[in-house]
Image (cartoon, rainbow, N blue to C red):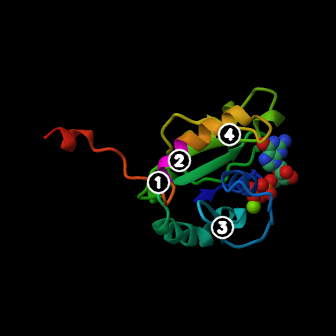
Amino acid sequence: MIIGPGKSGKTTLAAWLEDSSDIRRVQNMVYRKNTLDTPGAYLESPWMHHHLIAAAQDASCVVMTADAKGKREVYPPGFAKAFRVPVIGVVTRCDLAEGDCKGAVRQLIRAGIQPPFYEISIYDTERMKQLRRILDPYRPDASEPEKSEERRE
Ligand SMILES: Nc1nc2c(ncn2[C@@H]2O[C@H](COP(=O)(O)OP(=O)(O)O)[C@@H](O)[C@H]2O)c(=O)[nH]1
Ligand SMILES: [Mg+2]
């Protein structure tokens, strides 16, 4: 599940993770094979937060995005703590920020997310692939992680 402010690149990231060129930008939740894309308005309107928290119950992890260029603070302090699944902090559109993503990283920290943070750009395939590797284990069809401890017994 991908949440974040409007225009922070959530839908673009979701399409990339789906290997899809279909980047329809609609104002509701979009469930696809691997991703749940959410509207920025759900985060930006506090009375909509419960929809995000409820929808996260179907998710194996939450990706919280912060736009590298976005100055607006949209996450309430500690918002990540509202989710029971792992929360991964991603700074988006880093190509626009001339190497300075620190403000966005600070937003993610104030939102209660633990490092590491992933600084991505849709134009930087290496970083996109690295994020995909991080998210791979959370895919619905991902194989169970190896239980090496148990196997040894
Ligand atoms: N420069 C740049 N633009 C991006 C990137 N990712 C998305 N965008 C653009 O940012 C705008 C908002 O993206 P979108 O995915 O619709 O954001 P959403 O509102 O969070 O779903 C669109 O014009 C995208 O083409 C990126 O990594 N770099
Ligand atoms: Mg969108």
Q: Provide the major secondary structure of the magenta segment.
A: helix
* Image-based side of 153 in relation to 40, left or right: left
Looking at the picture, does residue 44 appear above or below residue 12? below
Asked if marks 4 and 2 touch (Cβ < 8 Å), the reply is: no
Asked if marks 3 and 1 touch (Cβ < 8 Å), the reply is: no
Label 1 vs label 2: CA separation?
Answer: 7 Å
Provide the residue designation for mark 4.
128
Quarter assignment of residue 71: top right
The stretch of residues the image draws in magenta is 134-138
Find out if the beta carbon at label 3 lies less than 8 Å from the nearest ligand 2 atom. Answer: no
Q: Tell me if residue 33 is in the magenta stretch.
A: no
Identified at 60% across, 40% down, the residue is 131
| Residue found at the far left of this picture | 153
Find out if the beta carbon at label 2 lies less than 8 Å from the nearest ligand 1 atom. Answer: no
Could you tell which of marks 1 and 2 lies nearer the N-terminus? Answer: 2
Could you tell which of marks 4 and 1 lies nearer the N-terminus? Answer: 4
Residue type, label 4: Met
| Residue found at the far top of this picture | 99
